[in-house]
């Protein structure tokens, strides 16, 4: 009896073959990556969402900064090397994605220590009216 009910339910669930077809729609994948673990974005109140691409030339850096909101970052090409507030270093290769946390306690610098440009695709989730980043001095452990 349970099997019969289950089969009846399956028969009533619409399949992809019954979906309404789209028309006049195109899409382009700009970048794709995989995170090491869960990604969690959050916002409180009115939020600016900005999508941007950044290229860091070999030997280049972002300078020390932080963000007032979170960023979803995807490394499209090259390898991004970030030094964090506590002077720990995170190396993120092409095809990887991560969330950059918000606030001055999460200051960091992004560097391209490789020989090819680092291309990043970023989605900023910022409190309305916030700048994309806030420049700051290096922490004392950075020796800069």
Image: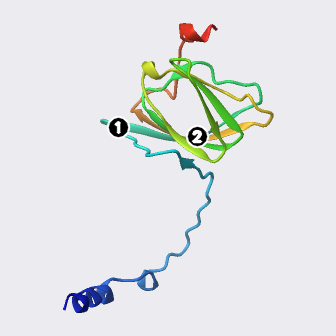
Please tell me which residue is depicted at 54% across the width and 20% down the height of the picture.
Answer: 65
Q: Is residue 73 above or below residue 58?
A: below
Q: Is residue 75 above or below residue 138?
A: below
Quarter that holds the C terminus:
top right
| Residue, far left | 1
Image spot of residue 106 (x, y percent): 47, 23
Left or right: where does residue 105 sit relative to residue 92?
A: left
Which residue is tagged 2?
Answer: 52
> Quick one: 129 or 136, which is closer to the camera?
136
Q: What's the colour scheme?
A: rainbow
Q: How many marks?
A: 2
Please tell me which residue is depicted at 62% across the width and 7% down the height of the picture.
Answer: 143
Judge the density around disc 1: few (<14), some (14-19), many (≥20) Cα neighbours within 10 Å: few
Which residue is tagged 1?
Answer: 43
> Quick one: 3 or 98, which is closer to the camera?
3
Q: Is residue 21 above or below residue 105?
A: below
Image spot of residue 9 (x, y percent): 26, 86
Image spot of residue 45 (x, y percent): 30, 36
Please tell me which residue is depicted at 62% across the width and 19% down the height of the picture.
Answer: 63
Between the C-alphas of marks 1 and 2, the distance is 18 Å
Give the mark nearer the N terminus: 1 vs 2: 1
> Which structural element holds mark 2?
strand
Image spot of residue 124 (x, y percent): 49, 37
Quarter occupied by residue 4: bottom left
Please tell me which residue is depicted at 25% across the width and 89% down the height of the picture.
Answer: 3
Q: Nearer the viewer, mark 1 or mark 2?
A: 1
């Amino acid at each position: 009896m349970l099997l019969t009910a289950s089969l009846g339910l399956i028969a009533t669930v619409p399949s992809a073959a019954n979906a309404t077809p789209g028309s006049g729609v195109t899409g382009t994948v700009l970048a794709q990556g995989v995170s090491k673990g869960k990604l969690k974005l959050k916002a409180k109140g009115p939020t600016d969402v900005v999508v941007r691409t950044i290229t860091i030339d070999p030997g280049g850096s972002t300078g020390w900064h932080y963000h007032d909101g979170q960023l979803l970052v995807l490394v499209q090409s090259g390898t991004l090397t970030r030094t964090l507030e506590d002077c720990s270093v995170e190396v993120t290769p092409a095809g990887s994605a991560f969330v950059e946390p918000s606030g001055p306690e999460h200051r960091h610098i992004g560097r391209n220590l490789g020989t090819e440009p680092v291309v990043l695709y970023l989605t900023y989730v910022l409190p309305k009216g916030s700048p994309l980043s806030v420049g700051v001095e290096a922490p004392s452990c950075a020796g800069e």
